[in-house]
Amino acid sequence: MRQFLTVISFMLLTIGAFAGFSNLGIPQIEPAPPPVEEVIDLGSMNMEQFIALGDRIFNGKGTCTLCHNSLGRAPDLGQIGTNAQARLDDDRYAGDAADIEGYLSESLTNPSAYVVVGFGKAGSDDTESPMPSTSGGSIALSDPELAAVIAYLQDKGGLEVTVEIPTDVEVPEEEPAEVASGEPRAPFTTFQELADEFACEACHTIGEEAGDLGPNLSAIGASRDAEYIRRAILDPNADIAEGFDEGMMPDDMGEQIYAIELEIMVDFLSQLK
Amino acid sequence: MNTNKKLLSYGILATLVVGLLAAFGGTDLSAAFAAGEEVAATTGGYGPAPVTTAADYPSVAGANGRLVVWIVAQLHLWFAAFVLAVPIFVFIIEVIGMRTRDKRYDDMAYEFIKVSITAYSLTAILGGLLLFALILFYPHLFGYLSTIFSDSMFYYALLFFAESAVLYLYYYGWHWLQGGVRKWIHLTLGLLLNAVGTGLMLLANSWLTFMMSPAGVDAAGVFSGDSWAAIHNFLWNPINIHRFVANIAYGGSIVGAYAAFKFLTAGTDREKAHYDWMGYNANFIAICALLPLPFAGYYLAAEIYAYSQQMGITLMGGIFAWLFIIQAVLIGALFLSANYYLWCGMGRSDGAKRYHKYIKYIAIVLIGAFLVWFTPHTLVLTNSELKALGGPHHSILGPLGIMPAKNTAVNTMIIFTFLSFLFYRRSNKVAVVRWERAGNIAQVALFAAGIANILFLGIYHGYFTNTVYKVAASIPQVMTTFVVIVTSLVLDSFIYRGAKDVGPLHWGRIPDRAQYALFLLAVAFTWLMGLMGYIRSGIRQHWHVVDIMRDNSADAFTPTLGYAANVVSIAAIIFLTMVIFVFWIAQVSSTKTLPSGYWKE
Ligand code: HEM
């Protein structure tokens, strides 16, 4: 019996130690409560308050900062002032927006309408955005809340705030987000497939295909070694090729390609002499 | 045995309830689903996921529904994991016994299964209780899930009956089905038992993973009717793999604790020797399954990330990031106690002195590796903390928090745990081959090269490369570990070919404190499982079924880590109590009281 009690005490002590560590050794962060629809009294709000509301949603309930932060998971929204117009002017743009407000609204409710180069879901060739629709699914902002976020983004980007404070508040429509169809893609096996998929030739000249946004790569193997090329693909801003701008070349290739694909690209390019 | 049978009949009763309710779940709980079915009738079979309000979550006698379901589910899972894992290694041990014709193995296998058999009825009772609690507290969620999974719930009930039948045949037929063809029949039963058990686990896992990564339904939750799509959802296999392996390690650790207790209370040396041997084997099983677990875990995390960036970030970057610190402490405890037990076990041999001097170095390396694992990666910090640190990563320690460093730590832990094991194996042997020295040098060179390679890969990729390339290090690292282990085992088997024993192994000659390492192993495993259950459900946040069916109950919020740890601790204590009860019952069933003058002559 004594033996039994010793063993039991030992076990209870162990459990107590684990519980103690979890309670005292770890900061107790109170997780954010589930998002609720704020009761917004729009009638009495001026534009400044409306923008402040957008700020709160952006940094809180909207969970935008989960991705739009300084870690490079998503585009820097501080630059949206200049970027938004550029997106609309982009040849790839195929959405329905006619102005910046429209573009922002579309970005929030239908992120895949236009996907910023390099930020698409792995393997979707920037046709599918990893950003969930913020009007449905797990974020589920109501129309007035969306308008407030857009006002906030315009303000933050130094643009003229064109949104109007909605006067007739409708019940927000539940528009559930798409369920991600998850299968990871199969790896590509040739350089050409990869170049097509990731549109290298949109910017680079490689043999026949000609693009001139980036350096000509037709003979890159003559001047650069494999190590350099690997770095140029994974971390393009580490060395900037002369005469070109920083930040053009997508810098998240690393997240989009498999290691084996990286090696295929490096092998191929370093043999171009 | 009488008590046993009684438990059995409760078990069957509970199963019947499970079976009936599950099979007719869609129609029986009419109150809850009437609305859903109306829609279902108009949309050709299935309706959208129910939209609930706080009023849709019945409050029963003031009990906190979430807490009840949480604890009951966890208890059920613990028992189920144990009950499904034990037959796996019982089968393997039985095969070993059959091949070596060493009866000790057969006896041990029998004793293992005996331990699990009483737990089996409790598993069923808890399963019934869980079902009851779910229907009581979450009628709409259960209703929705059972319309989608009505088929598989029905098969689950069938499989459960099959499992019971095969298990009882396997257990009660053990002594009857001995020798020649009969042994083969018995082994076939064992295989069948495992096949059915694994099938059960896979089905239950699919319901769970459906809630995390729903498939086979549209955005509103309308089921397409394709059951296989719903079962074979994105996270199903990653969880299947991690659970399967974890369950084996867990089962080994519980049986180890049983043996440890029997050892401590054994009356005779013979008994001590027996339970020492049993504890050794249980620990061996736990270690074998423990070694691949970290990789299965990272694979699971990577798949969660691949399924949904949002969920992945919640898992590894949000408040749950702190949870992984607790996880690291527990896993450190697991590795250290398993190693400590091996080191103590070397006392069974008279030849072990030769290796004593190395053990402190292994201990140092293990602790070092543990500390690296312990270093957090990206944490959610307050703004001022962020500024003080100069970013979410520390500039020098930062790389210690990322994957290559953690992989390096994990691989190092594994290699050194293997080294402990190698020393243990060698401790009672004297090599007779002439090239022993050369062989040992080769072993040292092998380990040195392996460790150097792992460190090089880790440091190079951790500090000098970017993103994908960092992860690319993990494969050559794992390969290195694997090659070192296999080559070393082969080499050692040649060095020790025809080796002389230093003397007979003194089973039973092990300090009592070594048994406490086995208790620690079992408790840490139990607790870890509970903790991971919290994160698994926690990353769904305020969703019953992610993005499809929202949790609108008053308890939809995510509790703090401390609260979760307390719930897990209480559940673990209840579990322990039940396990002790189970063992006690097994004990009682074999003691006889002969009252004198009670019965008429
Ligand atoms: C030696 C290393 C590890 C051990 C011993 C271990 C052990 C366990 C155990 C016992 C469970 C409970 C299984 C069950 O409920 O049936 C579990 C679940 C889980 N583990 Fe691990 N694990 C390890 C590594 C990891 C790693 C590295 C990760 C991720 C970074 C991870 C993520 C998870 C998750 C998300 C669950 C919940 C899934 C479920 O319910 O099955 N694990 N782990």
Image: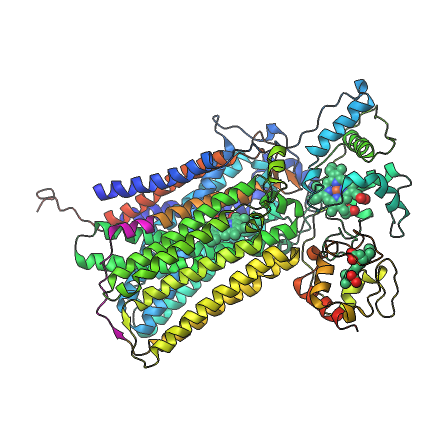
Image location of residue B523, percent across then percent down: 38, 46
Q: In the image, B188: left or right of B587?
A: right
The answer to which quarter of the image holds residue B291 is bottom left
Residue at image position (73%, 66%) is: A265
Image location of residue B418, percent across then percent down: 41, 63
Q: In the image, B191: left or right of B277?
A: right
Q: Is residue A128 above or below residue B133?
A: below
Q: In the image, B450: left or right of A93?
A: left
Residue at image position (49%, 59%) is: B411
Q: Is residue B47 magenta?
A: no
Depth check, front residue: B50 or B561: B561
Q: Is residue B479 visible?
A: yes
Q: Which residues are magenta?
A: B500-519
Q: In the image, B103: left or right of B377?
A: left
Pick the quarter of the image with the N terminus of chain A. top left
Image location of residue B333, percent across then percent down: 40, 49
Depth check, front residue: A183 or B391: B391
Q: Is residue B198 above or below residue B5?
A: below
